[in-house]
Amino acid sequence: MNRYLLDNRRPEAGERFAALAELFDPWTFHHLDDLGLGEGWRCWEVGAGGVSVPHGLAERVGPGGRVLATDIDVSWTEPAAGGVLEVRRHDVLGDPPPAEKFDLVHARLVLVHLKDRAAALRVMIDALRPGGWLVIEDADSLLQPLACPDERGPAEELANRLRTRIRTLLAERGADLAYGRTLPRLLRESDLEDVSAEAYFPIGSRACVILEAATIQHVRDQLLAAELATPEEIGTHLANLAGGDLHLMLAPMITAWGRKPA
């Protein structure tokens, strides 16, 4: 069985990637730009998923830089390969690490799903050149577990119930739903310097609704098979989303960064 609940091979993955890009790319690149990302940098994007972050990296590093985008499934990123952007199928836990060293190693919504997060973190740190930056971004679902914190009636109650049940599926697949909060400590314990972190809570945007609908469709079969939802509940929730009256909130995205000692 594929341990990753949100399999990239599903057609809904494209909708999820587009919504995640709209929600989080400005946040991600705000931090990367602040760290000095620019011309000539060599970057490794781990678990790239979609194309938006690799494209943004490639634009910033220019013709003298390099971007390596890896994932266990590169079907969404492979068409973007070319120029400074290389796309490679790679399992950060099972395959040998890249032979080169990088100015930046970045992963977003990757480690939370892995079985051996500590080993993956070590692989990424070891891939940094002296002075290079590691930037890890992961959600913390337990800090804010509700789809609709402003629970006004049956539609919000249903949204919160289904959000809880999806997280049950994620936990059964090995996801650590409280991983995001541990990132600052883990980076400091890894002897990185200048470690810091921030959190971002998207709320009430169109992209939140698109992401929610795509995610529900993505995991519909698993919810039904596990008897965590009925077809009627799923249909009602999707109709509520389409009606535009739900003000959804996501779990916080925690971004943590640190620099390998020179």
Image (tube, rainbow, N blue to C red):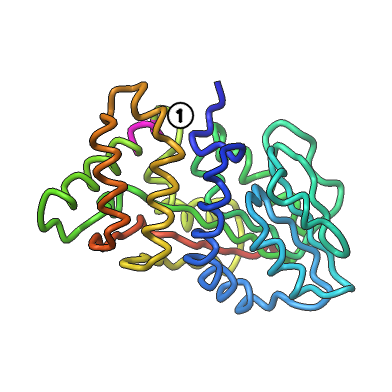
Q: Quadrant of the C terminus?
A: bottom right
Q: Which residues are magenta?
A: 167-171
Quadrant assignment, res 203 = bottom left
State left or right for residue 34 relative to residue 144.
right
| Residue 32 visible (yes or no) | yes
Magenta span: predominant SS is helix
Coordinates of residue 192 in the picture (x, y in percent): 61, 59
State left or right for residue 169 relative to residue 261.
left
Coordinates of residue 123 in the picture (x, y in percent): 69, 44
Q: From this viewpoint, which residue is outermost toward the left? A: 153
Residue at coordinates 24% horizontally, 34% vertically from top-left?
A: 232
Could you tell me the amino acid type at mark 1?
A: Arg
- Neighbor class of circle 1 (other Cα within 10 Å; few <14, some 14-19, many 20+) is some
Q: Which residue is mark 1?
A: 173
Q: Quadrant of the N terminus?
A: top right
113 lies above or below 127: above
177 lies above or below 243: above
Quadrant assignment, res 209 = bottom left
Residue at coordinates 47% horizontally, 58% vertically from top-left?
A: 184
Residue at coordinates 28% horizontally, 49% vertically from top-left?
A: 239
Residue 215 or 134: which is nearer the viewer?
215
Quadrant assignment, res 72 = top right
Regarding mark 1 in the picture, which secondary structure is present there?
Answer: loop
